[in-house]
Amino acid sequence: MKLEYTFKSKWADFDPNRHMRHSAYNDYAAEARVRFLMENGFDILKLNKMNLGPILFKEETNFLREINLGEDITVTVCLAGMSENGDRFKFQHQIIKPNGVVAAEVIVTGAWLDLAKRKLSVPPSDILEMMDKVDRTSDFVVL
């Protein structure tokens, strides 16, 4: 499943140097992940009922090109890694300019948290099936 989401950059995303602020890239990557979950029936209300939530351990961003104010950007979502039981995951996002040039790459590593026990948890089979449909990176690893 190829996942891409398009956003229009906005005034609040930019700093006084006319650069997209560093954290805006990560915000768009997070929004893409949330939209992916929502499109597959796992909005925040359903996840809360399941006592389950995604958490992040690490977020790494590589900045490659500038994004200009008002440019549409496309954010991809690919699975770069997952543990055998599915409790941990690694996503790779590319932030792409309208001309197809990759402006940034965001890699996040995280896990599923049981919100009641406050411990890592293996997600239910329907979430594992959803994750299995996501395109994998060429360097996908078992975590």
Image (spheres, helix red, strand yellow):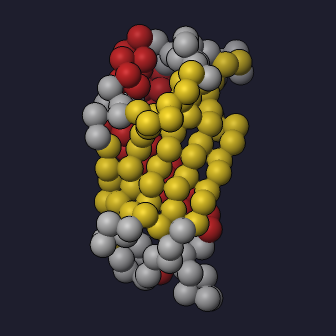
84 or 117, which lies in front?
Answer: 84
29 or 117, which lies in front?
Answer: 29
Locate residue 51 relative to residue 97 in the image: left or right. right
Q: Position of residue 9 (x, y in %)?
A: 41, 72
Residue shown at 36%/17% (left/top)? 129
Q: Is residue 57 visible?
A: yes
Indicate whether 120 appears above or below 62: above
Residue shown at 37%/80% (left/top)? 70
Give the number of callouts: 0
Q: Quadrant of residue 62?
A: bottom right
Indicate whether 139 appears above or below 126: below
Q: Is residue 114 visible?
A: no
Residue shown at 32%/43% (left/top)? 3
Q: Position of residue 126 (x, y in %)?
A: 37, 15
Locate residue 25 relative to residue 119 in the image: left or right. left
Locate residue 112 relative to residue 41 in the image: left or right. right
130 or 100, which lies in front?
Answer: 100
Residue shown at 30%/72% (left/top)? 99
Q: Residue furthest bottom?
A: 17
Name the quarter where the C terminus is drawn: top right
Name the quarter where the N terminus is drawn: top left
Indicate whether 11 appears above or below 56: below
Q: Quadrant of residue 34?
A: top left
Q: Position of residue 61 (x, y in %)?
A: 61, 57
Locate residue 92 relative to residue 118 in the image: left or right. left
Q: Quadrant of residue 33?
A: top left
